[in-house]
Image: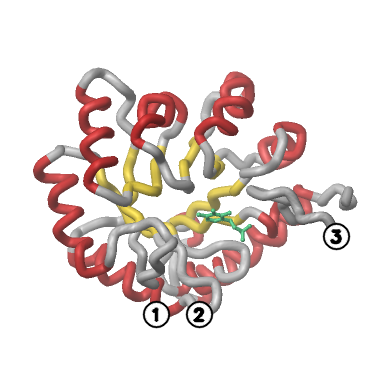
Amino acid sequence: MNEPPKDVAGALQEVRARMDRSAHDADRDPAAVQLVCVSKGKQASDILPALEAGERIFGENRVQESQKKWPELRERFPDLELHLIGPLQTNKVREALALFDVIETLDRPKLAEALAKEIQSGGRSPELFIEVNTGREPQKAGILSEEADGFIAFCRDQLGLKVTGLMCIPPADEQASPHFALLSLIAKRNGLAKLSMGMSADYELGIQLGATHVRVGSAIFGARHYPDPTPSA
Ligand SMILES: *Cc1c(COP(=O)(O)O)cnc(C)c1O
């Protein structure tokens, strides 16, 4: 099951080049699109080549896994920006605030309240993106699109949370473009500047449709056997 080690630096060059090309094609400033290197399921030794290549923005989907990997890496690379891109349980809010600079998965009122409470009592105050379930998938996290305006207002106006953007994960078996377009529309009418959309398979499309953040994992670090171990073949 061991795969040959991925040439992370080479893969990053390729992803960076494609991002630049997509931005140029869409008449956008390449500097306006941030690459979030998704390092979930990867060990520090796999992540190091990306840090050494100059990458500083990383995405993880689990609080506990991140607690094990990142404090040590942050000592060596203090200018890191760590994004939480996986679901956050309310009982992990304190740990998440201590660790992450951006939480991309604010997806329900209970979590918003827990974040507000913890931030008020002196926790760090990360940037927050609201996750929108644009595909209305019952198994997926995120606020429904028709509830997004109300939820954004609740978070910003009632709780005073620092909401700066939106994030979505389109259904795997559908064209991503209508989902990206919908996310962009909701952001615009709510005055939110940041849009996290696009993964390894569709980050170029995300950039064409206005992404300010693309979350790219396997195209940089190779395949993951994660979160579940590969079933025995
Ligand atoms: C794993 C993950 C990614 C990265 O997926 P790749 O297809 O490996 O690029 C992006 N966003 C979220 C929310 C993820 O969980």
Instruction: Name the residue that disc number 1 marks.
Output: 178
- Tag 3 residue: 233
Q: Residues within 10 Å of mark 1 (few under 14, many from 20)?
A: some
Q: Quadrant of ligand 1?
A: bottom right
- x then y, percent, for residue 10: 78, 54
Q: Residue at x 55, y 42 (%)?
A: 60
Q: Is residue 210 left or right of residue 16?
A: left
Residue name at image x 56 percent, y 70 percent: 202
Between marks 1 and 3 in the image, the one whose residue lies nearer the viewer: 3
- Whether residues under marks 3 and 2 lie with C-beta atoms below 8 angstroms apart, the answer is no
Instruction: Please name which of the two marks, 3 or 2, marks the residue nearer to the observer.
Output: 3
Measured as percent of width and height from the top left, residue 112 is found at 24, 41
Whether pointer 2 and pointer 1 mark residues with C-beta atoms closer than 8 Å, the reply is yes
* Mark number displayed over residue 174: 2
Q: Secondary structure at mark 2?
A: loop
Q: Nearer the viewer, residue 129 or 226?
A: 226
Q: Amino acid at mark 2?
A: Glu
**Dot 1 amino acid type:** Pro
How would you rate the neighbour count of disc 3 (Cα within 10 Å): few for under 14, some for 14-19, many for 20 or more? few
- Residue 194 visible? The answer is no
| Residue labelled 1 has its Cβ within 8 Å of some atom of ligand 1 | no
Q: Give the SS element for disc 3.
A: loop
Quadrant of the image occupied by residue 15 = bottom right
Q: Secondary structure at mark 1?
A: helix
**Where is 118 relative to 42, above or below?**
above
